[in-house]
């Protein structure tokens, strides 16, 4: 049984809309090119090659927002942060913090589940050079807004990287909220105001950050410890 069949109907309908999206010609062309050409190590894979839907608990209190699928990670497997080094680093940390039932995620049918957490992104298609344009992120934003509306118990949002952070601030400001002035920093915690979720920021768990030591295991664990503390008991 796939993770998709476990979702309530509103989520199934939403994810179907995400997967069918072809709004951005540049991204459609690139995601499909990557899926055709493949990486040598994955020549036997049938690449996903489509927009990647959110993954996790539909009753989550915590929303995790990343940037975009990896070319040979999510664009290959069809699940957020699955199949590349970023996902390995992320899921191991989530397991240690009690948000995941296992420390590894390699493919959709691997048994990985998340508790009290939903993982999504500001852009659902793999972009060339991992750099979606501002217009492409805006085109994808309705999907993120819909997911926020589908989470009735949301208390906090973890932003993986500056772009996710900037997009979340822009979303609330566009809705008319007067937000505090805040700079991006690792493990930064920001209450947005009454009735709004809090924001927690982290460096993105990209290979570039983890292999250079800009983001260490201890630094990443501290983010999820803060999230767990702020959420409190379920």
Image (cartoon, rainbow, N blue to C red):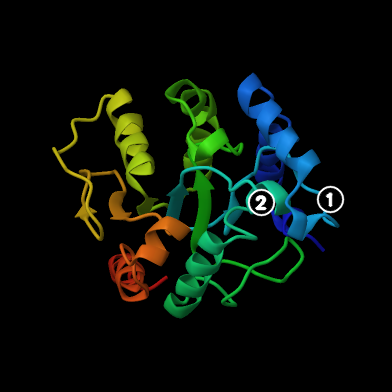
Q: Which residue is mark 2?
A: 72
Q: Give the position of the C terminus as an image quadrant.
A: bottom left
- Residue 104 visible: yes
Helix, strand or loop for disc 2: loop
Residue drawn at the location 19% of the way across and 35% of the way down: 179
Residue drawn at the location 57% of the way across and 34% of the way down: 128
Q: Which residue is mark 1?
A: 46
Q: Residue 222 at x, y = what percent?
A: 29, 71
Question: Along the horizontal axis of the image, is 69 left or right of 60?
Answer: right
Sort mark 1 into few (<14), some (14-19) or many (20+) by Cα contacts within 10 Å: few
The numbered mark at residue 124 is none
Residue drawn at the location 42% of the way across and 56% of the way down: 208
Q: Give the position of the N terminus as an image quadrant.
A: bottom right
Separation of marks 2 and 1 at Cα, in angstroms? 11 Å
Q: Residue 212 at x, y = what percent?
A: 36, 64
Q: Looking at the image, tell me whether mark 2 or mark 1 is earlier in sequence order.
A: 1
Nearer to me, 210 or 164: 210
């Amino acid at each position: 049984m796939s993770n998709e069949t476990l979702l309530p109907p509103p989520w199934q309908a939403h994810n179907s809309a995400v997967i069918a999206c072809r709004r951005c010609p540049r991204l459609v062309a690139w995601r499909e090119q990557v899926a055709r050409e493949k990486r040598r190590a994955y020549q036997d894979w049938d690449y996903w090659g489509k927009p990647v839907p959110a993954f996790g608990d539909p009753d989550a209190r915590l929303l995790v927002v990343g940037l975009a699928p990896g070319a040979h990670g999510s664009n290959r497997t069809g699940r957020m942060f699955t199949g590349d080094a970023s996902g390995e680093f992320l899921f191991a940390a989530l397991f240690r913090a009690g948000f995941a039932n296992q420390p590894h995620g390699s493919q959709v049918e691997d048994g990985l589940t998340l508790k009290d957490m939903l993982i999504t992104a500001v852009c659902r298609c793999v972009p060339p050079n991992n750099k979606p344009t501002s217009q492409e992120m805006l085109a994808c934003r309705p999907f993120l807004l819909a997911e926020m509306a589908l989470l009735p118990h949301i208390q906090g949002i973890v932003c993986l990287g500056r772009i996710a952070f900037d997009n979340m601030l822009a979303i609330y400001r566009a809705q008319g909220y007067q937000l505090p002035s805040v700079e991006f920093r690792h493990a930064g915690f920001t209450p947005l105001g009454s009735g709004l979720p809090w924001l927690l920021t982290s460096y993105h768990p990209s290979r570039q950050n983890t292999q250079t030591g800009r983001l260490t295991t201890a630094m990443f664990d501290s983010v999820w410890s803060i999230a767990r503390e702020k959420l409190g008991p379920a």
